[in-house]
Image: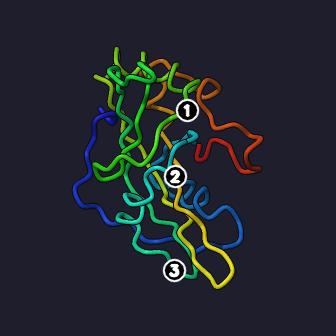
Amino acid sequence: MRLLRRRHHQSYPRFADTGADAPALAIEAIAHDRGLSYVELDVVGEANYQAALEALAGPTDEDGKHQLVDVTLRCEPLNPYDTNAVRVEAMGQLVGYIPRPTAAVLSPAMQSACGGIVEGLGIIVGGWSGPEDEGHYGIRCWLARKDLERIHVYCDEVRRPVARSTSRRTVGR
């Protein structure tokens, strides 16, 4: 089952910013290669995990980062702030959370269908520094549509809101 698949030390190339939505284009290429369709989920709280994101992507530089990583979404039913909390991890490091409304849909389904853990793809973005400004790190997260459907969660229930960007869509087939 793809939900609990682990990739051991698989290296991914860094994707240069093409002026378009480079992270979405990278995921679209991967989706095409794998014959899959991915759905982007919003991630919040990355500001609290800048050290972990920097450790994974490397120090800030003039060009910034587009570092492809495997992500694990893990339910936190004992979280004191939200029993439906779903944490986002990259290489075992906590890097953010799925927003409450989406977690309220995902968490019960994940806990009942797959032990509270689902794997997907992520791209660490940001991390640029220049003479006049700098960008904090963030992470974008995608899950395979097939994996979501296996746990009886459908795209419209979890897809990242369109209002945040013009490129929020399902990628692949």
Q: Earlier in the sequence, mark 3 or mark 2?
A: 2
Q: In the image, is 19 to the left or to the right of 49?
A: right
Residue 123, percent across and down? 49, 57
Tell me if residue 61 comes above or below residue 156 in the rendering: below
Contact between labelled residues 2 and 1, with CB atoms less than 8 Å apart:
no
Q: Which mark is residue 99?
A: 1
Residue drawn at x 74%, y 49% is 165
Residue 152, percent across and down? 48, 18
| Count of marks, rendered view | 3
Contact between labelled residues 2 and 3, with CB atoms less than 8 Å apart:
no
Distance between the Cα atoms at labels 1 and 2? 14 Å
Label 1: few (<14), some (14–19) or many (≥20) C-alpha neighbours in 10 Å: some
Q: Amino acid at mark 3?
A: Asp
Label 3: few (<14), some (14–19) or many (≥20) C-alpha neighbours in 10 Å: some
Q: Nearer the viewer, mark 1 or mark 2?
A: 2
Distance between the Cα atoms at labels 3 and 1? 29 Å
Label 2: few (<14), some (14–19) or many (≥20) C-alpha neighbours in 10 Å: few
For mark 2, give the secondary structure: helix
Residue 126, percent across and down? 56, 65
Distance between the Cα atoms at labels 3 and 2? 18 Å
Residue position for label 3: 61
Residue 155, percent across and down? 60, 28
Tell me if residue 98 comes above or below residue 81 in the rendering: below
Residue position for label 2: 47
Residue drawn at x 57%, y 54% is 28
- Direction left: furthest residue: 8
Q: Amino acid at mark 1?
A: Pro
Q: Nearer the viewer, mark 3 or mark 2?
A: 2
Q: In the image, is 133 to the left or to the right of 48?
A: right
Q: Earlier in the sequence, mark 3 or mark 1?
A: 3
